[in-house]
Image: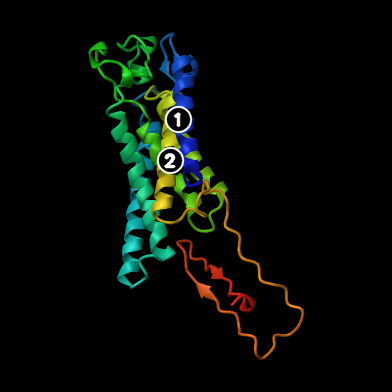
Amino acid sequence: MRGNRGLLLVALALGATVTLFASTGLDDFVQDALYDSAGAGWLVPAQARWPRLLFYRLPKVALAAWGAWLAGSALARLWHRAPARSLAVLEPLFLFSALALVPASVGLAKQHTRVHCPAEIERYGGRIAEHDLLALWRPASDLVTPGRCFPAAHASGGFALLALVFVGDRRPRRAAWGLAAGWVMGGYQMARGAHYLSHTLVSMLLAWGIVLLLARLYGLDSEPGNLGWVRRERPQLPERTGARSPEEPRPIRRYAAGFDGRERTSAPADPASQ
């Protein structure tokens, strides 16, 4: 059970989020603040040129370009005979996998959940009577037109950057990059009526769950059984009280260059324990 703790927490958070938003009016409360029923419409017009370029097209292109560079970087290192299981190869492949699989998985899910976008709801000028977050569990015959808006696929591309937590020196604060990118991209979609808050929250949790699975698959989770947030401590060498004796072996330094270019040193074995 300990090894699956992170995924278990993600599953519980997903269930709690869907239950909360399905049984309350939180989604409508947030969208009401972004919509002017008097006639102005959404805070960001759906086809506004510059917001769409800055918050929709450019992030997609940037993430796709970076993903291609990561894949090329890993292949180039393999071509130059870097060990296939070295961090120099595994880390860029891991990031590429996250950038590819997170949006693909969320995008596939939204095709089957039958949930509508805010702009399709009568409350916001659409034709569907009401927002139903549990439409997946309703009989298909009860749905006039199945929706395809849940979870938020566009925001998931930004949330895929949560994978940065597991590369380099594996600092948890790197999650800020993924959270910032995901919420900027998701916030834009909410402001133009393409998604509810619940859609973006669920997308974030799914992205983190997929990242956890990939980190375990690539062996990049810092210790077996944790959430990936606990940094691996460097082993401490015993303190020296004097000069090294001629019989004492010199320490062996082993290096494994990671994706960030830094060298990681493993401590020598203690001669007394051999």
Badge 2 element: helix
Residue 246 image offset from top left, x and y in percent: 66, 91
- Could you tell me which residue is drawn at 50 percent across and 58 percent down? 168
Q: Is residue 12 left or right of residue 57?
A: right
Residue 111 image offset from top left, x and y in percent: 27, 29
> Disc 1 designates what residue?
14
Give the answer, above or below, for where 44 lies relative to 129. below
Badge 1 element: helix
Q: Is residue 55 left or right of residue 79?
A: right
Q: Amino acid at mark 2?
A: Gly
The answer to whether one can see residue 187 in this image is no
Q: Amino acid at mark 1?
A: Leu
Tell me which corner region of the image, top left, top right, bottom left or bottom right, holds residue 267.
bottom right
> Disc 2 designates what residue?
209
Tell me which corner region of the image, top left, top right, bottom left or bottom right, holds residue 151.
top left
Q: Are marks 1 and 2 in contact (CB under 8 Å)?
A: yes
Could you tell which of marks 1 and 2 lies nearer the N-terminus?
Answer: 1
Furthest residue toward left: 141
Q: Nearer the viewer, residue 227 or 184?
A: 227
